[in-house]
Amino acid sequence: MALPRLRPESTALLVIDVQERLMPTIAARERVETNCALLARAAGALGMPVICTEQYVRGLGGTVATVREALPATAEVIEKTQFSALVDGVRAALRTQRRPTVLVCGVEAHVCVLQTVLDLVAAGWTVFYAADAISAGQVDQVEHAFRRMDRAGALPTGTLGAMYELIGDASHPSFRDILELAKRVPKNA
């Protein structure tokens, strides 16, 4: 039985709702922002598609500068009001890019991230979630969301593990780029 793996040629990164007026309420804010930005930079270095969603921009603002500046020029930023990020624009982007695997990060774990993961799995995508790049305003909700995602078939990973799994080998042409990013992953977070 072949186990699902993160590979740059088959994976898209989905960054969910890391927004200006939402992030001040999020537990471990700096860790989440840093890890989402590092994953975006890694995806860019590896030529992976990146989709970034923004929930109700008028009320919650745009994507925080740390993450916005890390998005590759080819990233698609899609506004939404639905909690699940699997809105028409995201679904179309994922289908166009023909990536059967989606790596998810962002906030809030028990609302938009959870509903997105459930919808992605139900629609047939293989889903990994970067647990150290996900949080919520109510920290007790995060573990419930993670358990639910696990039971639905999503696969947990971390920022560091995801980056190394994506390159797979120290001889990968982007190894040095990923190594530099890996050094910036927060420790003991």
Image (cartoon, rainbow, N blue to C red):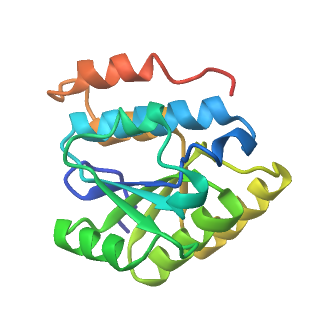
Q: Is 95 above or below relative to 145?
A: below
Q: Position of residue 185 (x, y in %)?
A: 51, 24
Residue drawn at (26%, 50%) of the image: 75
Residue drawn at (26%, 76%) of the image: 92
Residue 108 seen in the figure: yes
Q: Position of residue 25 (x, y in %)?
A: 74, 44
Residue drawn at (42%, 77%) of the image: 87
Mark count: 0
Residue 119 horizontal side relative to residue 175, left or right: right
Q: Position of residue 104 (x, y in %)?
A: 47, 55
Q: Which quarter of the rendered picture does the C terminus lie within?
A: top right
Which quarter of the picture shows residue 125? Answer: bottom left
Residue drawn at (69%, 23%) of the image: 188
Which quarter of the picture shows residue 147? Answer: bottom right
Q: Is 136 above or below relative to 184?
A: below
Q: Is 91 above or below relative to 14?
A: below
Residue 77 horizontal side relative to residue 105, left or right: left
Q: Nearer the viewer, residue 82 or 12?
A: 82
Residue 153 seen in the figure: no
Q: Which quarter of the rendered picture does the N terminus lie within?
A: bottom left
Q: Outermost residue toward the front? A: 58
